[in-house]
């Protein structure tokens, strides 16, 4: 069996420049590669370690309830671990993200915020807590 070496989440958006500014310049994902052709543009951004989290509807509903207080996410939600979820939430909101829920301490001891970002992506920003 071939080993998977990388996970890429591909986001198609009509406002490429705004999404690029938000995820690269505001969230801070570094550029790995940029390609342009007569057919369009793509930028590949590094996001640290990638995982694929598979949840059943009950667990997804539980996470929404903890982070937001109600069911809000669709089939896909992107989670980014950050050093300071309160600061990152404010920075992303200032750059145009819609804050769905401010940072909330979770039962699994992290501080999670929920936002709606460019490219119609629902985002969780999470900070692992030590105590």
Image (spheres, rainbow, N blue to C red):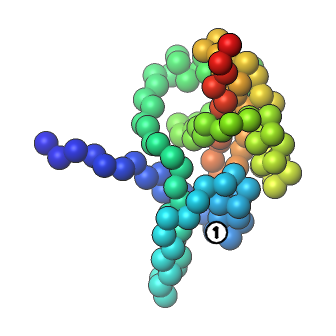
Q: Locate residue 128 relative to residue 97 in the image: left or right.
A: left
Q: In which quadrant is the C terminus drawn?
A: top right
The relative height of residue 80 versus residue 14 in the rendered view (above or below) is above
Task: Please tell me how many numbered marks the rendered image carries.
Answer: 1
Give the x, y percent position of residue 81.
Answer: 61, 36
Residue located at (43% from left, 37% from top): 51
Q: Locate residue 21 relative to residue 60 in the image: left or right.
A: right
Q: In which quadrant is the N terminus drawn?
A: top left
Give the x, y percent position of residue 119.
Answer: 64, 56
Residue 15 position by quadrant: bottom right
Residue located at (53% from left, 37% from top): 75
Tell me if mark 1 has few (under 14), some (14-19) or many (20+) residues whose alpha carbon lies within 10 angstroms of its own: some
Q: Which residue is mark 1?
A: 16
Residue located at (47% from left, 84% from top): 37
Taking the view exactly as shown, the residue that stands out farthest to the bottom is: 38
Residue located at (81% from left, 48% from top): 91
Nearer the observer, 40 or 130: 130
């Amino acid at each position: 069996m071939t080993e998977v070496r990388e996970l890429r989440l591909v986001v198609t958006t009509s406002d490429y420049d705004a999404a690029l500014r938000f995820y690269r310049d505001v969230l801070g994902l570094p550029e790995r590669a940029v390609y342009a052709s007569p057919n369009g543009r793509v930028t590949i951004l590094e996001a640290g370690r990638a995982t694929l989290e598979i949840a059943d509807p009950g667990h997804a509903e539980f996470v929404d309830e903890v982070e937001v207080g109600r069911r809000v996410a669709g089939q896909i939600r992107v989670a980014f671990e950050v050093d300071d979820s309160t600061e990152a939430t404010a920075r992303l909101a200032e750059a145009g993200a819609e804050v769905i829920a401010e940072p909330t301490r979770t039962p699994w001891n992290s501080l999670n915020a929920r936002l709606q970002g460019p490219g119609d992506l629902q985002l969780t920003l999470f900070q692992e807590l030590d105590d």
